[in-house]
Amino acid sequence: MSSSQGGWRDLRLVLRPFLATQPRALLWGGLLAATTVLAGMALLGLSGWFITATALAGLHAATAFTFDVFMPSAGIRLLALGRTASRYGERLVTHDASFGVLAALRVRLFRGWACPGAALELAMRPSRLLFRLTSDIDALESLYLRLLVPAAAALGAALLAGAVLGFMHAGVGLALLLWLVAVGWGLALCIARRARRPAVRRAHGIEALRARTVDLVAGQTDLVMAGRADAQREALMNADAHLARADLALNRLETSAGAAYGVAGTLTLVGVLLAVGALVGEGAIGAPAAALGLLVALTVTEPFAALRRGALDAGRTWLAVRRLAPRMAPDEARPGVAAVESGAACTVSLSRLSAAHSGSSGIAALNDVSLAIAPGERVALIGASGAGKSTLLAVIAGEIVPLAGSVNAEPACLLTQRTELFQDSLRDNLRLADPAADDARLWNALQSAGLAGDVRSFPAGLDTALGEGGLGLSGGQSRRLALARLLLRPVPLWLLDEPTEALDAAIAHDVLQRLYAEAGPRTLLIATHLRREAALADRLVCMRQGRIVAELRRGSPAFDAALNALRPD
């Protein structure tokens, strides 16, 4: 697929949810914008015609008494009031619609990052993806407010001007219409093409400036201890200089664009002046009609000039479209993981699986792995650090797409080594697992996880506000909260990655007992190097250097030997 075809595909992926969120409001905003422009042109044109006609009528007593001044003046008042009302309505509707669309797109994008496969990328590059959530989404505002709406208004202005001049002379009206569309849109396209590179450089400059500033502020202690504070300040200054050069290039281009539209407006006015002058000389039209045509031509290029700002931002908008489109596409449940049919003999089935971590240059972390787990079975993956246990869980969860082989698994929930908590209420941290859960279900989950007593002792209960990263809870409480979230997730397969690591023995045994009791008929796959966690398993799967080297079932001497060889509490 060529880059242009891929670009248009990306644009469709972004425009589809953009236009589908509030289509009626977006359409009304465009119509009101066009109405405002047309009312302004009609107001100036009718005022010019009325002044000229009144002056000519006053030259003769007979026409002075018969000339109707009420209808034109009423029309002028109506247009003035209508233009004011439509301008207010246009600003209200377009901005409200665009803000609503952008808010919906942020939710859609964030949900895309919450899906398997994207969470790992988000954890590895939080500052860059935060920029996607804020600045890239904001850049889409230009797509509607500064490109689509002005383009529609400019087309309406060209049609009105062509119609007005067309009533005087069909050829003049058609020529004006074609000239306006060709020059007005052509200049915007030329500006957009020339501004694309500096606009992209400016976007990258802002991104680098923000990231380096955050690194300098948040990591100043580490930077000073490593002797890299001066280097970080130098990098920050370089990013600022890069941004300044991009701004300068865009400012120069904006000045040139303003001059180009000014020249186009002057040429349009001169052309219409010559045309209406010739028509007046031939007696085809009178002086009032000539004044009407001139004043319409005077204002018709203003809507096209409004495209200038959008054309300058088009490069930035296009970059945002290219970066956001992958998360606007229909999401797969789990990348690379096929769903297991209901009633199948295996909850998990891996066949000749190979996988690698992102950024590892294709170096496989798993090699030719085959494994089958029956429904309700409890399996522990054991082996030294780096053997591939966590990678195997990530593949089954869909966090890593396999290089080769097949993965079939039922819907799963992955409990990682690190408990991810957010700066929010305890209730909302729990509802990440099930947004529809009521307080009764939340308390049941907390009770099963052994945290209900602690939460009841908090003055705010479920409304207790947690700090960044779950600040306010101990390590054991955080792990129990993660367990409660696991219990709220209605899936038949639990993937547990060292679920009690870094907990003291008493809390760890309590958490494991609760896990075992609440698992019920669920299938468990546990990655561990601790004896207490592996003791839950019916089968031990030994891994070494990304391969399965042995499978040991409970009751065999080899099972007991492998279990006793693991690290004790």
Image (cartoon, rainbow, N blue to C red):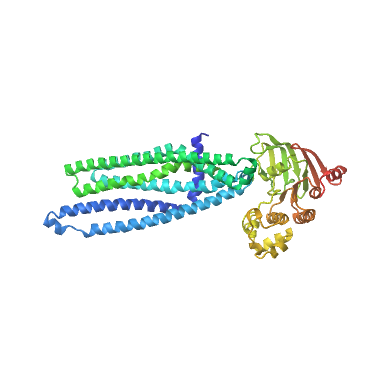
330 left or right, relative to 172: right
- The quarter holding residue 191 reads top left
Q: Residue at x 41, y 53 (%)?
A: 29
Q: Nearer the viewer, residue 483 or 436?
A: 483
Residue at the left extreme, as displayed: 61
Q: Residue at x 54, y 50 (%)?
A: 106
Point out residue 102 in the picture as x, y percentages from the top left corner.
50, 51
Point out residue 156 in the picture as x, y percentages from the top left corner.
35, 47
Q: Is residue 455 above or below residue 212?
A: below
- The quarter holding residue 262 reads top left
Point out residue 317 in the picture as x, y percentages from the top left corner.
47, 43
Inspect this view and state whether residue 219 appears: no
Q: Residue at x 55, y 39 (%)?
A: 234
- The quarter holding residue 402 reads top right
Residue at the right extreme, as displayed: 557
Q: Residue at x 22, y 47 (%)?
A: 290
332 left or right, relative to 491: left
Inspect this view and state whether residue 294 appears: yes
Point out residue 456 in the picture as x, y percentages from the top left corner.
69, 65
How many marks overall? 0
Q: Nearer the viewer, residue 325 or 430?
A: 430
Q: Nearer the viewer, residue 315 or 65?
A: 315
Q: Nearer the viewer, residue 454 or 555?
A: 454
